[in-house]
Amino acid sequence: MLLPIYVYGQPVLRKIATEITPNYPNLSEFLANLWETMKKADGVGLAAPQVGESIRVFVIDGSNFTDDDPSMATFIKTFINAQITERFGEKTLFNEGCLSVPGIREDVSRFSSIRIKYCDENFNTFDEVFDGLKARIIQHEYDHLEGILLIDHLNPLKRKILKSRLNNIAKGIADVNYKMKAVKP
Ligand code: ZN
């Protein structure tokens, strides 16, 4: 089932998401919906708060980046209860977009490598290091669990320039190919 995507202005995007247990109600159905919603919206990743659930869950399909990095072809993963324990390496810029901030693309500075503990959809636990594009996408999705949006990484002047566009998004004025849930529909 396709879920509406909550956009800028929705309070759920600013909450710290909570961990879940394997008994979380209807988890497999929720994950299936999250995957379906991300694919339909041509997203690279989608975090649970973006569909209104403040839980520590996100999904990533990096296969669109296979041309840039062949190892991205199999970077299709579910992350549950993720905790980034280290960020290291160089800080690099990369042009990012976000389904919750439609129409805005900006260069965001992030560390090139991370170490992360997480569970997969079967609650097997992992403690892994990711680099490059994988670390980039994980950090973006992880931010959603911490109530952070990509615009928070921009300098005050940039944010000021984007203010009216952000206000429009909050009102549901944006050209998107998915169902969005704005504060004032
Ligand atoms: Zn996002």
Image (cartoon, rainbow, N blue to C red):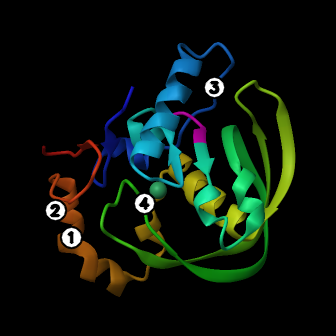
Assess disc 2: are there few (<14), some (14-19) or many (≥20) residues with their C-alpha within 10 Å of its C-alpha.
some
The amino acid pointed to by label 2 is: Asn
- Residue 181 location (% of width, % of height): 25, 41
Real-space Cα separation, disc 4 to disc 3, in angstroms: 24 Å
Q: Along the horizontal axis of the image, is 129 left or right of 174?
A: right
Which residue is tagged 4? 98
Query: Between residues 42 and 168, which one lies in front from this camera angle?
Result: 42
The amino acid pointed to by label 3 is: Ile
- Residue 116 location (% of width, % of height): 78, 51
Q: Which residue appears at 37% of the width and 31% of the height?
A: 2
The answer as to whether callout 4 falls within 8 Å of ligand 1 is yes
Which residue is tagged 2? 168
User: Quick one: label 3 or label 2, which is nearer the N terminus?
Assistant: 3
Above or below, 113 relative to 75: below
**Which region is colored magenta?**
54-58
Q: Secondary structure at mark 3?
A: loop
Which residue is tagged 1? 165
Query: Between residues 15 and 30, which one lies in front from this camera angle?
Result: 30
Which residue is tagged 3? 20
